[in-house]
């Protein structure tokens, strides 16, 4: 039976909630978007949060779909590959994909502002300073603390796009047969910055995502439009070295001098920023179902993942894109559309969560490993000669529309085959003579 849906509430005006509200408004629904923070277009709220993100194919296709990609392109900076910095300051560039394939560094705040402008221009009602205090899953109602008073509002349908610590999800978790798991990795992160040079230029190459891989931890840097870089230190909370073990400005300086020596001349305010900027944790959240009565989870609220594949936002945008496609398919029959949304996206959410956890090992450790780099070269050659038959996992996730769950399964099969190839004793010297056709046949069998 078709649900009668007129007024939709969207809780959380972050990246995903703002995009979702545009999609829903374009379909003709009355859409109200609620956000606990102040309007970021009037008051800067970026402090202490991840300042830039990598936007790739899945996110871009959704932004194209709602017609705002041209505005977004103006704030995108292409990153064509990884620039690895060894401890001795040697640089190695590893392209992400084929020529012309790149990911994009984008300011979280500016992207969110564009999305909010667009939502407003389309007629979405946006309420800032509305903090959700309680969700009634049975009645599809939300109690808000607002600047004036507390009020309870009721909707025909409610989306929880309120992030990793979602109140909507917490309310759903109190109902029967709701599964939930969360996992904190032992590492946290802290943001630092590389300002533009005195001449107003980028201090390091702007067309790459820079990585200082150091085994158990790493530093990364993504370029910004103002020619600065936002750096993120992914570091264990405890142990040696760790956030716990670096207690004084001198210890921080010594650590960077020994561990990331070529970064230090560019990190102009390292000692200050290290102690001033917050240390945040990294969590993976999986839950099920995503739909309970008339409440629906989307984005990080449904699938918070660690950031090592650069896919959290992209996955959330793809949720919106997919849901819109399903509403087309089912002629806005919400019951059928939501059933399929949950079935498809839950599987994909789990897959990208697992991939992201695995990619941390790759980024912080393997990218500096000779064997791993040779494997990547073989895979690039395979892709060049058999572009339809062997697509490297990173490309499937980042540059294609293939379901995350399918990419994950194909990636596992590829890895088994490559493990075998890489066991050849002379592989590092003779990698160019491996039988590529045989490898592809194995994948197809
Ligand atoms: C260090 C780091 C780096 C990352 N890098 C990338 C990357 O390169 N590429 C990528 O694709 N993704 C990346 N991500 C992931 C990305 O940031 C998230 O996936 C994305 O922000 C999720 O968007 P969202 O709208 O679902 O949630 P959020 O961005 O968390 O937005 C939730 C919104 O809900 C509001 N809210 C929360 N609770 C309430 C309440 N009770 N009442 C009212 N409002 C509420 C919040 O204020 C917020 O505005 C990264 C994440 C981190 C931590």
Image (tube, grey):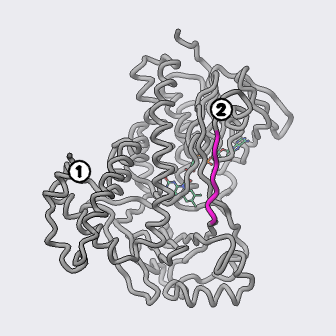
Q: Foreground mark, 2 or 1?
A: 1
Residue 185 painted magenta = yes
Instruction: Name the residue rendered at 19%, 60% in the picture.
Output: 382
Magenta segment includes 329: no
**Numbered range of the magenta stretch:** 180-186
From what the image shows, is residue 151 above or below residue 230?
above
- Position of residue 147 relative to residue 281, above or below, is above
Predominant SS of the magenta segment: strand
Q: Is residue 420 left or right of residue 86?
A: left
Pick the residue in front: 284 or 40: 284
In this view of the protein, which residue sits in the foreground, 40 or 240?
240
Whole-number angstrom distance, CA of label 2 to CA of label 1 = 38 Å
Q: Position of residue 132 (x, y in %)?
A: 76, 37
Q: Is residue 116 above or below residue 211?
A: above
Q: Which residue is mark 2?
A: 178
Where residue 122 appears, as percent x and y from the top left, is 53, 32
Classify residue 35 by image quadrant.
Answer: top right
Q: Is residue 24 left or right of residue 424?
A: right
- Judge the density around disc 2: few (<14), some (14-19), many (≥20) Cα neighbours within 10 Å: some
Query: Is the residue indicated by label 1 positioned so its CB lies within 8 Å of ligand 1?
Result: no
Write down the residue under mark 1: 443
Residue 159, image x, y percentages: 61, 31
Find residue 321 and report its horizontal and vertical position in percent: 44, 36
N-term mark: 2 or 1:
2
10 Å crowding of disc 1: few (<14), some (14-19), many (20+): some
Seen from the viewer's position, the closer of residues 319 and 70 is: 319
Looking at the rendered structure, the secondary structure element under dot 2 is: loop
């Amino acid at each position: 039976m078709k649900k009668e849906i007129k007024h939709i509430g969207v809780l959380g005006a972050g990246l995903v909630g703002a995009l979702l509200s545009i999609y829903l408004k374009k379909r003709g629904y009355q859409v109200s978007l609620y956000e606990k923070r102040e309007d970021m277009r009037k008051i800067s709220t970026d402090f202490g949060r991840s300042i830039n993100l990598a936007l790739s194919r899945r996110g871009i296709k959704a932004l194209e779909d709602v017609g705002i990609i041209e505005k977004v392109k103006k704030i995108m900076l292409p990153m064509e590959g990884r620039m690895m910095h060894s401890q001795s300051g040697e640089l190695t560039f590893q392209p992400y994909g084929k020529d012309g394939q790149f990911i994009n560094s984008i300011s979280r705040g500016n992207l969110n502002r564009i999305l909010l402008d667009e939502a407003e221009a389309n007629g979405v009602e946006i309420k800032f300073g509305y903090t959700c205090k309680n969700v009634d899953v049975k009645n599809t109602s939300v109690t808000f603390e607002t600047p004036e008073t507390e009020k309870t509002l009721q909707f025909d349908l409610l989306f929880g796009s309120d992030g990793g610590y979602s109140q909507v999800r917490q309310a759903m978790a109190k109902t029967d047969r709701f599964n939930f798991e969360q996992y904190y990795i032992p590492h946290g992160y802290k943001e630092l910055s590389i300002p533009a040079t005195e001449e107003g230029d980028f201090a390091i190459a702007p067309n790459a995502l820079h990585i200082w891989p150091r085994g158990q931890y790493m530093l990364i840097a993504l370029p910004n439009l103002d020619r600065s870089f936002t750096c993120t230190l992914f570091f264990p909370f405890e142990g040696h070295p760790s956030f716990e073990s670096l207690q004084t400005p001198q210890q921080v300086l010594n650590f960077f001098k020994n561990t990331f020596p070529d970064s230090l001349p560019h990190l102009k305010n390292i000692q200050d920023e290290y102690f001033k900027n917050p240390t945040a944790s990294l969590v993976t959240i999986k839950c099920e179902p995503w739909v309970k009565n008339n409440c629906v989870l989307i984005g990080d609220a449904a699938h918070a993942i660690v950031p090592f594949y650069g896919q959290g936002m992209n996955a959330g945008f793809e949720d919106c894109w997919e849901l819109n496609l399903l509403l087309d398919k089912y002629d806005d029959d919400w019951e059928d559309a939501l059933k399929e949304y949950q079935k498809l996206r839950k599987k994909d959410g789990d897959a990208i969560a697992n991939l992201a956890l695995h990619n941390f090992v790759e980024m912080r450790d393997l990218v500096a490993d000779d064997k791993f780099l040779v494997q990547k070269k073989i895979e690039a050659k395979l892709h060049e000669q058999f572009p339809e038959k062997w697509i490297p996992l990173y490309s499937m996730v980042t540059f294609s529309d293939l379901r995350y769950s399918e990419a994950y399964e194909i990636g596992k099969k590829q890895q088994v085959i490559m493990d075998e190839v890489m066991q050849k004793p002379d592989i590092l010297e003779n990698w160019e003579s491996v039988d590529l056709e045989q490898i592809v046949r194995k994948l197809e069998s």
